Amino acid sequence: MPYPYKKMDEADFQYIRSVTDPARVRVGDAIPNEYFHDEMPEYGVFPPELYVEALSREEVSAIMKYAYENNIPVVARGAGTGLAGGANCKYGGIMLSLMKMNKIFPVDTQNMTVTAQPGALITEVAAAAAEAGLFYPPDPGEKTASIGGSIITNAGGMRAVRYGVTRDYVRCIEAVLPNGDIVHFSSNVVKNTTGFDVKDLVVGSEGILCICTEVTLKLIPAPKYTCTLVIPFADLETCIDCVPVLLRLPFVPTAVEFLERELIDIVERTLHKVLPVRDGSAVLIVMYDASSQEELTQCCDAAAEAALAAGALDVALADTPERIGSVWSVRAAILEGMKADSVGQEECDVVVPRSKIAEFVKAAKRICLARGVVVEPCGHAGDGNIHTELLRQSGMSDEEWKTATHACLTELYAKSKELGGQLSGEHGIGNGRLEFLRPFVGEGMYQLYRNIKLAFDPKLILNPGKMITFDD
C-alpha cells in the first residue's frame, strides 16, 4: 500500500450520507459488482467500501474535503467504459460516481462552445452541438462513454486524423482538487498564456490529479457531406504502405482504419455484422468529410485513383447513411467480437510513427505466435495507433496465459520504443500498464510524473495506484 489509508467505519458512512443523500449511498455488500471494474476486469476487480452518486460540485467538494482530512482514498467514476483498469478502487475507500451530474447547458453559438457536466454522454454532447448546427468531432468507439471520462483519458477515436483528440477541444475545466477546493483551469477564451496551462495537464491525467465537475468544449462548423471508402489489399504491407499515399493528397481524410481479414471474419461469425467487401486479406476504411458535394467527389476520386495505383484490389464507395453505418458498425464491433471469440483478452495499445505500422504489426505477430498466443492487430492507421489484441484460447491454463502475455507485452512495448513510438496511444496507463510505464519513460521522467502528482495530491488519496506508484 502506498499510504496508510483509513479503513472506513460507520461514522464515515454517516458523514457521506449527511452531505449527499442516503438514497444515493451504498455500503459494502450493497454495492453492485459492476462498479468493481471497468471494461477490462483482467486489469483488476477491487470493491470500494462506499459508493456514492454526486449531484453537484458542492457535494464533490464536501466528499473530497472529508476524505482528505481523514486519509480515505477516492476514485471518481464515469460510465466505466475504460480499457486500462483505471476506474476501480484498488485500495478500497470511496467510489464517487459522477454519472448523475449530466447536465448539458445551452450551446453558446457566439463562442461556438458547449458546457457540460462530466456525466453527460459524448453522444449527447455531440447531439446538442448538432442541434445547434455545429459539430463536436471526438468520437471514441464506445458510444456510452461519458464526457468526463473522455476528458481525463484524452480520448481520441477514429476521427482524430483530421480533427485531433479531446485535448484539442477543451476550452476550460472546473474541477475539485483532492483537498476539496473548487478551481477553474483557463476560461472560455480562444488563446491564453496566463501562467502554466494546467488545463492541458489535467486532460489525460486519468483521474489522479483532480475531479472534473464541468467542462467547456470548442465546437466547429458541421461538415455537410461525408462518404466512406472500403479499400481491400492482397496483403497487410501493401495496405499500410497506402496510408502515407492517401495522407499526401490535398484532401485530409477524417479517418483511416486498417483491419485484417481474420478480424472481419470474427465479427461476422460472432456478431453477424458483415463488411460489404469480401476481397483482400487486409482492408483500409477511409472516411472523408466535405463542405460541398463537388469537394467530396474530388476527395473520393483522388483517393480511389491513388489507392488503385498503390496496389489496391478495388475501391468500394459507401455514400448513404445506411451503407456508411454498416461499414463502421463492423469496425466498432471489433472488441465485442474478440470477446465473443475467445476466453480472455489482453491488449497492447501502442502508437508508432505511421511509416512503422507494418513493421510493428509483423513483429507483433512473430512475438506473440512464438509464445502460442493468438494476436489480431487493428487500429487507426492514420495516426499510428495500433490495437494489438492478444486472444486467449481454450486450453491455456491461467499461469500459461499470464506468463505468455507478460512476455509478449514486454517485447511489444520494447519494439514500440525502438520504432520511436509510445506505450499507449489512447487507452492510457491505468492499472493494466502500470508496471511498464517506468522502464518505458525512464527514471527522470517518472520522477517528474510523481512530482506532478504530489503537487496536486500530497496525501495520494485520489485514484491511488493508477498510472504511477509510490511503492518504493
Image: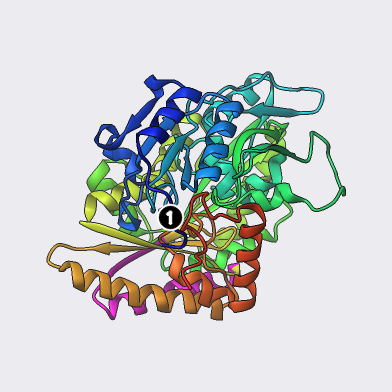
Q: Which residues are magenta?
A: 354-377
Q: Nearer the viewer, residue 37 or 465?
A: 465
The residue most toward the right is: 193
- Left or right, 7 with respect to 321, comes to left
The image position of residue 60, as x and y in percent, is 56, 32
- Let me know if residue 433 is in the magenta part: no
Label 1 sits on a secondary structure element that is: loop
The image position of residue 124, as x and y in percent, is 54, 26
Q: Nearer the viewer, residue 328 or 31?
A: 31
The residue most toward the left is: 395
User: Amino acid under label 1?
Assistant: Ala
- Which residue has dot 1 on it? 84
The image position of residue 385, as x and y in percent, is 53, 61
- Left or right, 246 with respect to 395, comes to right
Q: Nearer the viewer, residue 122 or 257?
A: 122
Q: Can you say whether 138 is above or below 412 in the image?
A: above
Q: Residue at x 37, y 20 (%)?
A: 23
Q: Residues within 10 Å of mark 1 (few under 14, many from 20)?
A: many
- Let me know if residue 369 is in the magenta part: yes
Q: Residue at x 59, y 45 (%)?
A: 178
Q: Residue at x 44, y 20 (%)?
A: 21
The image position of residue 456, as x and y in percent, is 65, 52
User: For the stretch drawn in magenta, what is the main secondary structure?
Assistant: helix
The image quarter in which residue 408 lies: bottom left
The image quarter in which residue 43 lies: bottom left
